[in-house]
Image (cartoon, rainbow, N blue to C red):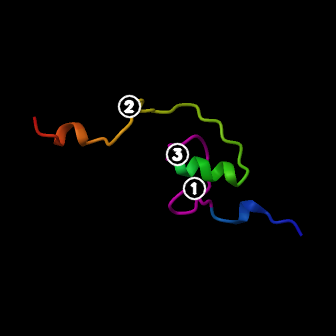
Amino acid sequence: MELDGSLLPSPFTPKGDHPTGPAWYATPTVAYAQELGYDVTPTEAYVRYDNGRYLDAGTTAA
C-alpha cells in the first residue's frame, strides 16, 4: 500500500498548507525535513560565527 503524501498536512507550516516556493525555516525544521527524506537545498542563510551566550557580553560588570 502506497501513501499519497499530498493528502497529508505539511509538517513545515503552522496551518499545514503545502509550501509553494522557497521560505524561511529554522535549522531544526530543515534537519527534520532531511530526516524525513526531503531534498533540502538552502539558497540563503544567516550564520552567526561567534559562539557562546548571546547576551553575556552586555551583562558582565566592568
Magenta-colored span: 10-27
Q: Nearer the viewer, mark 3 or mark 2?
A: 2
| Numbered tag placed on residue 12 in the rendering | 1
Residues at marks 2 and 1, CA–CA distance in whole angstroms: 28 Å
- Is the residue marked by circle 3 packed among few (<14), some (14-19), or many (20+) residues within 10 Å? few
The vertical placement of 22 against 28, above or below, is above
Q: Furthest residue to the left?
A: 62
- Amino acid type of the residue tagged 1 in the rendering: Phe
Q: Furthest residue to the front?
A: 62
- In the rendered image, which quarter contains the N terminus? bottom right
> Residue 22 location in percent, x, y?
58, 40
Residue situated in front as seen by the camera: 3 or 21: 3
- Is the residue marked by circle 1 packed among few (<14), some (14-19), or many (20+) residues within 10 Å? some
- Is the residue marked by circle 2 packed among few (<14), some (14-19), or many (20+) residues within 10 Å? few
| Numbered tag placed on residue 50 in the rendering | 2
* Dot 3 and dot 1 residues touching (CB under 8 Å): no
Between discs 2 and 1, the one toward the N terminus: 1
Residue situated in front as seen by the camera: 56 or 12: 56
Kindly state the secondary structure of the residue where label 1 is placed: loop
Q: Furthest residue to the bottom?
A: 1
Horizontally, is 33 left or right of 29 in the view? right
Q: Residue at x 70, y 55 (%)?
A: 36
